[in-house]
């Protein structure tokens, strides 16, 4: 078992593990709704649409989180505005904003001498360079996400399955939708600087999707997604340590691999039940 424990004898790997656990928790809370409502494309667009704000903040020496938050807010407002158009589908509006924001971000970043480094850090983060301040930031974000999830749970559930019924019950589905987008934005903005948009999106989608094969209640889906995300973090860090691969990308790959393992195991379980 030494091969499993050796990586975590190093301080920066232990910090990376804690960061991965916190990201897994916040992504489980936000990602469950993304998967249930079929908003994966929106989540991907928002995670990459932050690039212009991050790029401008980096070039001007401003706080990266502020820049990311402003870009994410622009994405949310843009998606909401285009979503009211009868001529465009929601996916079309999201796609246009996605490509437009990403293109602007790349153009801005291309003016930096460290173009390749900046873009790589944006996509993959640097989970092995996590500091105490980053962990505190993530812990606060997890706490906020937990409070929002508890307070908005009833409205979120009703809106996810029947918008008209949610409106009839006075749960204000429009407001609930906005709060959900804010929850997803919080997860992405709070996590990207540490683990990059690739890992955030991987943990936002893959663990909840994997948990859906086994759980029938939303709280159980969230709990399962958190456990799968933590497992992906551990597996990714161990593989990265021994194989010398990029830690963030390896964790994201582990999360996706666990989804396919879960899907295959679920199919085998159903087949065994049908033949029994």
Image (cartoon, rainbow, N blue to C red):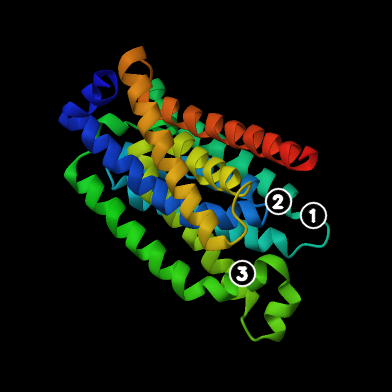
User: Is label 3 in a helix, a strand or a loop?
Assistant: helix
Toward the front, the furthest residue is 276
User: Is label 2 in a helix, a strand or a loop?
Assistant: helix
Of 14 and 122, nearer the camera is 14
**Marks 1/3: CA–CA distance:** 27 Å
**Marks 2/1: CA–CA distance:** 7 Å
Instruction: Count residues near mark 2 (Cα–Cα under 10 Å), then give few for <14, some for 14-19, many for 20+.
Output: some
| 3 or 2: mark nearer the eye | 3
The disc at residue 93 is 2
Instruction: Count residues near mark 1 (Cα–Cα under 10 Å), then give few for <14, some for 14-19, many for 20+.
Output: few
Of 181 and 10, nearer the camera is 10
Q: Can you give x and y, in whole percent of width and height, for residue 243 in the image?
A: 36, 13
> Residue 121 falls in which quadrant of the image?
top left
Rendered position, 48 above or below 69: above
* Residue 203 in view (yes/no): yes
> Between disc 2 and disc 1, whose residue precedes?
1
User: Is label 1 in a helix, a strand or a loop?
Assistant: loop
Give the residue pinned by disc 1: 88
Residue at x 68% of width, y 52% of height: 38
Rendered position, 272 above or below 68: above
| 1 or 3: mark nearer the eye | 3
Give the residue pinned by disc 3: 157
Q: Can you give x and y, in whole percent of width and height, for residue 134 in the image?
A: 25, 46
- Are the residues flagged by discs 2 and 1 in contact, CB closer than 8 Å? yes
Quadrant for the N terminus, please: top left
Q: Can you give x and y, in whole percent of width and height, for residue 238 in the image?
A: 33, 24
**Marks 3/2: CA–CA distance:** 25 Å
Residue at x 60% of width, y 45% of height: 209
Quadrant for the C terminus, please: top right
Residue at x 67% of width, y 85% of height: 169
């Amino acid at each position: 078992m030494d091969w499993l424990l050796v990586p975590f004898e190093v301080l920066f790997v232990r910090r990376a593990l804690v960061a991965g656990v916190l990201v897994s928790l916040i992504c489980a809370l936000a990602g469950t709704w993304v998967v249930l409502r079929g908003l994966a494309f929106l989540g991907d667009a928002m995670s990459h649409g932050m690039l212009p704000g991050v790029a401008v903040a980096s070039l001007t020496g401003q706080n990266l989180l502020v820049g990311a938050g402003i870009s994410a807010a622009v994405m949310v407002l843009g998606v909401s505005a285009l979503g009211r158009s009868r001529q465009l589908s929601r996916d079309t509006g999201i796609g246009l904003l996605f490509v437009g924001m990403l293109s602007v971000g790349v153009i801005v970043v291309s003016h930096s001498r460290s173009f390749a480094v900046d873009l790589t850090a944006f996509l993959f983060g640097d989970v092995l360079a996590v500091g105490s301040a980053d962990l505190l930031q993530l812990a606060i974000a997890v706490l906020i996400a937990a409070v929002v999830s508890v307070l908005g749970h009833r409205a979120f559930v009703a809106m996810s399955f029947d918008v008209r019924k949610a409106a009839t019950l006075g749960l204000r589905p429009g407001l609930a939708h906005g709060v959900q987008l804010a929850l997803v934005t919080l997860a992405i903005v709070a996590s990207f600087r540490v683990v990059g948009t690739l890992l955030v999106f991987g943990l936002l989608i893959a663990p909840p999707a994997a948990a859906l094969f086994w759980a029938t209640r939303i709280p159980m889906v969230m709990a399962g997604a958190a456990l799968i995300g933590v497992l992906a973090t551990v597996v990714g860090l161990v593989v990265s340590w021994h194989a010398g691969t990029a830690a963030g990308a390896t964790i994201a790959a582990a999360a996706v691999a666990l989804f396919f393992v879960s899907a295959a195991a679920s199919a085998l379980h159903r087949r065994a039940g049908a033949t029994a």
